[in-house]
Amino acid sequence: MAKTPTMIDCPACGHHVSSTAMSCPSCGAVLRKPKRGFFGKIIIALFWLFNLFMAFWLWGGSNAALEKSKGLTGAEQVGATIGTGLGVTMILVLWVIGAAILGLMALLTRPKA
C-alpha cells in the first residue's frame, strides 16, 4: 500500500503544500533540503581524504628531500634541487588531476532539487 503524502502549510505564505515537496509552488520557499545519497557521501569523503593525503605527501616528500640534500657538494645539491622540483611538479599535477576527477564526481552526485 502506497503512503499518501499529507498536506502541510507553507511557513512563508500559508499555502497548502504536499509534505514531500521540496519547495512551495506558490512562493518558492524551501521546505526541505535534498540530501546526498550514500554513493555521493563516499565520493565527498574520498575527495577530502585524497586532498589530505596529497598535502601530506607533498609536505613529507619536500621535507625528506631537504633533509637528504644537507651535506651535499655544489653539483650534487643542484641535482637534488632539480630532482625535488620535478618530484614536486609531478605530485602537483597528480593532485590537480585527481582533485578534478573527484570534484566532478562529487558534482555529478549532488542532491537533486
Image (spheres, grey):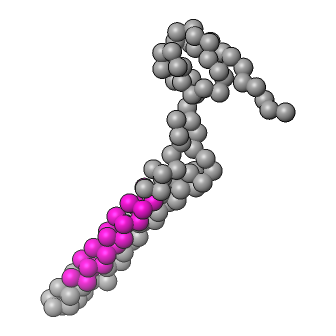
Q: Could you say where residue 89 lies in the image, as x and y percent from the top left? A: 27, 73
Q: Compared to 4, does 87 lie above or below?
A: below
Residue drawn where x is 62% and y is 12% of the image:
16
Q: Which residues are magenta?
A: 82-103
Q: Compared to 17, does 107 lie above or below?
A: below
Q: Compared to 84, does 111 lie above or below?
A: above
Q: Quadrant of residue 42?
A: bottom right
Horizontal arrangement in the rendering, residue 83 relative to residue 111 (left or right): left
Q: Is residue 113 magenta?
A: no
Q: Compared to 73, does 32 lie above or below?
A: above
- The one nearer the camera, 21 or 79, is 21
- The one nearer the camera, 9 or 68, is 9
Q: Could you say where residue 27 lies in the image, as x and y percent from the top left? A: 48, 15
Name the residue at the left extreme: 74
- The one nearer the camera, 84 or 74, is 84
Name the residue at the top extreme: 14
Residue drawn where x is 60% and y is 54% of the image:
39
The answer to whether one can see residue 19 in this image is yes
Residue drawn where x is 47% and y is 56% of the image:
105
Q: Quadrant of residue 73?
A: bottom left
Q: Could you say where residue 52 lies in the image, as x and y percent from the top left? A: 45, 60
Residue drawn where x is 43% and y is 56% of the image:
104
- Look at the image and tell me in which quarter the N terminus lies: top right
The answer to whether one can see residue 70 in this image is no
Name the residue at the right extreme: 1
Q: Could you say where residue 61 lies in the image, as x and y percent from the top left? A: 36, 75
Magenta segment, principal secondary structure? helix
Q: Tag count in the figure?
A: 0
Q: Is residue 99 magenta?
A: yes
